[in-house]
Image: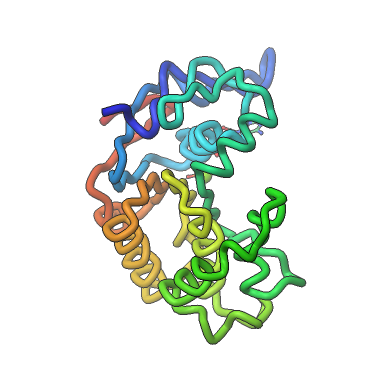
Amino acid sequence: MEPILKVEHVSKAFGKGEAYLKVLDDVSLEIHKGEFASLMGPSGSGKSTLLYIIGGLDIDYEGSVYIGGQKMTGMKDEEQSALRLAKIGFIFQFYNLVQNLSVEDNILLPIKMAGKHVDGYQEKLEEILDITGLTTKRKNKPAELSGGQQQRVSIARAVLAEPELLLADEPTGNLDSKSTTEIMELFKRLNDEKGITFLQVTHSKDTADYGKRIIQLDSGKVIG
Ligand SMILES: Nc1ncnc2c1ncn2[C@@H]1O[C@H](COP(=O)(O)OP(=O)(O)OP(=O)(O)O)[C@@H](O)[C@H]1O
Ligand SMILES: [Mg+2]
């Protein structure tokens, strides 16, 4: 079966001359549908850089990235954005919520930004509010929520359009252990029940162990 994600000989460097720094060095990997993979490695090893390239947030690199068999590399901006919106969800360490919008408006934002009607998403919105335990908080603003709740909003936002691949960069890096467990249980449920494929960056072995596979990065190379 075609992998949902294929990274082929990806290299990336920052800077020139004395400031030159090779951050990714010939990285190749494949992730298949339904996998729950954790990307680990020391600080500065290139984890976030790789995730941004996979997610199409950074398009300046060598090598190729395929999502669902389609080559993202070299694709026109608008096409790449459309594909990204349809197939990939992104979760960050610091939630990235819009402070003056309510929980439900934050969750619906990508749909609105894609120019789609939110009417078609009402049922899904109710379902994802329920799954993430946010139904009673739907009219609240992010500042009125705990860190764990805010992260659940960003997960609901990423999941609403039912992406095939969810990329998460240290999604629990900013949370206490109770919220971390809640978020990881939620990922596991979305992976099991909705078949969403996960690639998460984490520093914690406990968190990584929620996944079924660990990919080790060191100095820009996959070492296991
Ligand atoms: N925009 C940039 N300009 C120059 N160097 C950069 C830039 N972004 C990242 N780097 C460098 O690239 C290397 C890899 O950074 P990256 O953020 O991918 O690491 P990481 O593995 O995610 O680390 P951490 O675990 O601390 O989040 C680091 O040495 C970093 O300083
Ligand atoms: Mg990082």
Percent across and percent down for residue 118 are 65, 63
Left or right, residue 9 beside residue 111: left
Percent across and percent down for residue 187 are 36, 60
Furthest-front residue in this view: 120
Left or right, residue 77 beside residue 170: right
Q: In the picture, residue 27 is in which quadrant? A: top left
Q: Which colouring convention does the figure follow?
A: rainbow
What residue is at 69 percent from the left and 28 percent from the top? 77
Q: In this picture, is 50 found above or below 96?
A: above
What residue is at 58 percent from the left and 44 percent from the top? 85
Left or right, residue 209 beside residue 95: left
Q: In the picture, residue 122 is in which quadrant? A: bottom right
Q: Exactly how many numbered labels are in the figure?
A: 0
Q: Quick one: 122 or 145, which is closer to the camera?
A: 122
Look at the image and tell me in which quarter the C terminus lies.
Answer: top left
Q: In the picture, residue 76 is in which quadrant? A: top right
